[in-house]
Each structure stands twice: as structure tokens, then as C-alpha cells.
Image (cartoon, rainbow, N blue to C red):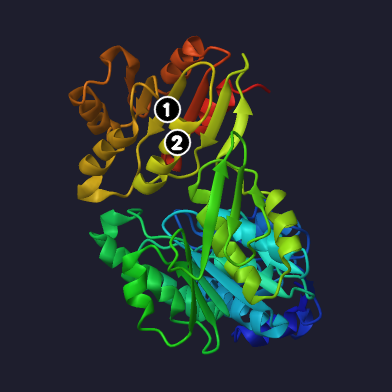
Amino acid sequence: MKMKLAEIAKAINAQNEIEQWKDIEVTSVSFDSRHLEKGALFVPLQGAHDGHQYVETAFTNGAAATLWASDHELTNSDHPVLVVTDPLKALQELGKYYLRKINPIVVAVTGSNGKTTTKDMIASILSTQLNVTKTYANFNNEIGVPVTLLNMEANTEVVVVEMGMDRFGQLDFLSKLVSPDIAVITMIGEAHIEFFGTRDRIADAKMEIVNGLKEDGLFVYDGDEPLLNERAANITQQTTRFGRQLTDDLYATSVNAGSRSIEFKVNEWPDEQFTIPMVGEYNVNNALAAMAVAKRLHISPNHIKTALANVELTENRAEWFKSKNGAQILSDVYNSNPTAAKQVLKTLAEMPVQGRRIAVLGDMLELGEAAPRLHASLAEQINPAQIQEVYLVGAEMAYLQAKLQEQGYPAAAIHYYQADQLDQLTAALEADLHPADMVLLKASHGLHLEQVLAAIKAQ
């Protein structure tokens, strides 16, 4: 991003006169006064704290200018200021303006699980032949999406935008903000079921991603999901289905899961073998979604192979580590929902190991009234012959503890802790781990199992 303040003021309809500041150059945007680049436009947002309190800090740290809400008294007229009705709406309008100015191909990605991994795969593949910008970390909401857009370099040819959702209307807004050329739904699960009640309603909310899809755009979706097939029949744009069935447009013809990678073949390029450096067969579907996007943009199969084999994933998504004594750690601590947890438990159960398989599972949040049933349902993937020890943390995991006991899982192998007992859990786990063991860490981010990971892994 590189814009004069005069251009920004016009794009967002600033209410004040800025003649004396019009030639100031802005090179980035930030809503965090502590961590911004020199030359940034500071956006004071209203959250737990009023961002206007931190404007002085922003300028001390190198901000070039700031937005300012018109209902706040202007406290320092010496700073370059753009007065607007609502800084967040101004940020969104600026992002939309800059997107039109750069005019890249827009790929929008959502889904109950796998959207960040799929975003990373798409960006990796497209970057082999195009200039690509992608959503940083999980900047995937009404704030993060415009920030992603404004982080584009002028030569950006494709922007890959991850879109999160926890209520109706959110994806409708984000989709219309970016007007995607390609919209992707990875899958429908139970994430956020507290807010939606049923998977049908989750599917309805996810389908909002096509509301801004260009008329000549492409909708890429999980063809093995009946809820999506039903809804996709009602859209006029072209569609591509990926999955594991012969009825899909792009499907895996063979899958060979190893201890650190997965090899697979697809119908579109039958003579090619693709590899992804991760575990869990569910990641093949994420790769297929990315490959469908690549096919649309005419990326060669050789470039797809190279990119998938070397893809760099966002932190805390199914990463391997070693413990201090050499035990293997599979960490997936950024987020969790029933679908994802069952998938990774299945993966753990199938992994070759000389010692024991140990699962450390924390609460899955935002499941509402379904939480007892959905936490208990994880017992379907926990067999004492395959997963020999289970550490559970959080109030909701008590339902899984009860279900495991009911099914006859050895009581001595179930270790339960409250959410504020991470230190005790960590100490017990460290004492229990043998060098030949393999341990899985999986929970919603609010449980902070990354603290357990930091304590037990080799430095």
C-alpha cells in the first residue's frame, strides 16, 4: 500500500480540511498502536478500550496519520487527522477502494474447518506463477479482511482472503466487500453451532460467501456434503465440486498416508503423484480445494506439485515437535470443533509409534446446548487399544470423561483437569511421557494449550 493522505481522504469522505497534510504518504494501516510500521495510518477502533486513547502512542511509534471519530473531541490538532463518522467503516471503505484500484483476482475461502490450511495451500500454489497476497494469520473478520486488502503490494495479481463467521450476515458483508472471483467452502461442521442451532443453518450462513461472487465467478465446494449440493443447485455461477467420490469434479483416486506426509493422486492429472507435508487424510480435501482454484487459474500440475510439497502453514495448525525427552508431539492448539477433533484423533490412532499414543484434549467452545453431546461424541474415536492415555481439560470435557468411563475406558488412564489447572496438567504429562510416546494437543484457543506445548517441547 502506498497512498497520499489526500487520496485516502477522498476515498473515505473525510469530514475535515487536510490541505496542509495532503501530500503525506501512508504505506500501511494498523489498529494496534504498539505494533505499527513507520508511515502507518492508525485506525482507533472501539473495543474493550477506545482506540482514541492510543493515538498519541501511535504517533510516538511512527504513525503518519490517524482516523478520528467525529463524535470524539479532537484533542491534538497538530497531528495529521482524518475525521470520519466511524473509523471501522472508513477502514472498510478504504479497503474496498484500494481493492478496486489494484484490481487483483480475489479468492475468498471459508468453512467450518480447514479454511486457514486451504488458504495457505492456495496461496502457495498460485505464488509459483503469480504475485499473491494472503490473509495474515487469522485476520478474517470485518477488521482483518480490509487490513488484508490494504496490505497488498501494487503488483498483486491475486489476493487470497480467508473469511470467518459466527453469525448470519457476516459472510454476506465480507463477500460483498471483496466481490470474489472464486469462492471456496471447505466443509460444513459443528463450529459455532451455539449460534446457529443446526448444521443446516450453518450451511445457510456459509453460503453467504457467494452473495458477492461475480457473475462469471466460480464456486468451489465440498461435493461430498449434501447440504452444500442442495444449496449450490440454486446459484447461477459455475461450480466445481471436490471430494472423495466419483461424482465430484475433482477427486482423489488414491491416498497413501505416511507418518509425516500424505501422497495422493487425482482424476484430473492421473499420472501425477502429489505430496503434502502433513498428517490427516482430511487435509487431502483441503489440497483438492486448492487444486480446483489452481486449475481455474491455469496453474500447471508441476507447479501444483512443487507448491503443495513445500507449503508453509500458519502457526499452530497440526505442527510436529519433539518433547524434552524425545517424545513426538502433534500440536493442533489454535482451534477445535467436533469435526476437526474427530479427524485428528483418527489420525493419531493410525500413526505408527513404538510407545503409547496420548491425547490431550481441551474444551471445544461455542457449542451451546449441544456441548455435552458433542464433547461426549469424541469417545467414538478413542479406543484404549489405539490411544492409551487421555488428558482432559475444561468443564465441558467432563462429558467426555463420563462417556469414556461408561464405555469401559480404563479409569486410571483418564486424567481430568479444570481449565485453570494447566500447570498441574503440564507437570503430570511431563512426568508421564516416555521417549517413544506420541502426544496430541488439541483444544479451542481459549484453553491455551499452547502454554502446555511451550513447557514440554524441546527448546
The image position of residue 164, as x and y in percent, is 46, 62
Quarter placement of the C terminus: top right
Using the rendered image of the protein, determine whether residue 336 is visible from the camera's viewpoint: yes
Q: Quadrant of residue 13?
A: bottom right
The image position of residue 330, as x and y in percent, is 54, 32
Kind of residue indicated by mark 2: Lys
Asked if the residue under mark 1 is in contact with the one under mark 2, i.e. CB atoms within 8 Å, the reply is yes
| Mark 2, residue position | 442
Give the answer, above or below, for where 280 lies relative to 51. Answer: above
Using the rendered image of the protein, determine whether residue 52 is visible from the camera's viewpoint: no
* 222 sits left or right of 35 in the view: left
| Mark 1, residue position | 360
Q: Neighbour class for label 2 at 10 Å: few (<14), some, many (≥20)?
A: many
Quarter placement of the N terminus: bottom right
Front position in the image: 247 or 280: 247
Give the answer, above or below, for where 186 lies relative to 273. Answer: below
Front position in the image: 90 or 434: 434
Q: How far is the residue under mark 2 from the one under mark 1?
A: 6 Å
Taking the spot 58% from the left edge, 24% from the top edge, the residue there is: 328
Taking the spot 47% from the left edge, 19% from the top edge, the residue there is: 426
SS for tag 1? strand
Taking the spot 67% from the left edge, 62% from the top edge, the residue there is: 123
The image position of residue 282, as x and y in percent, is 48, 49
The image position of residue 200, as x and y in percent, is 27, 65
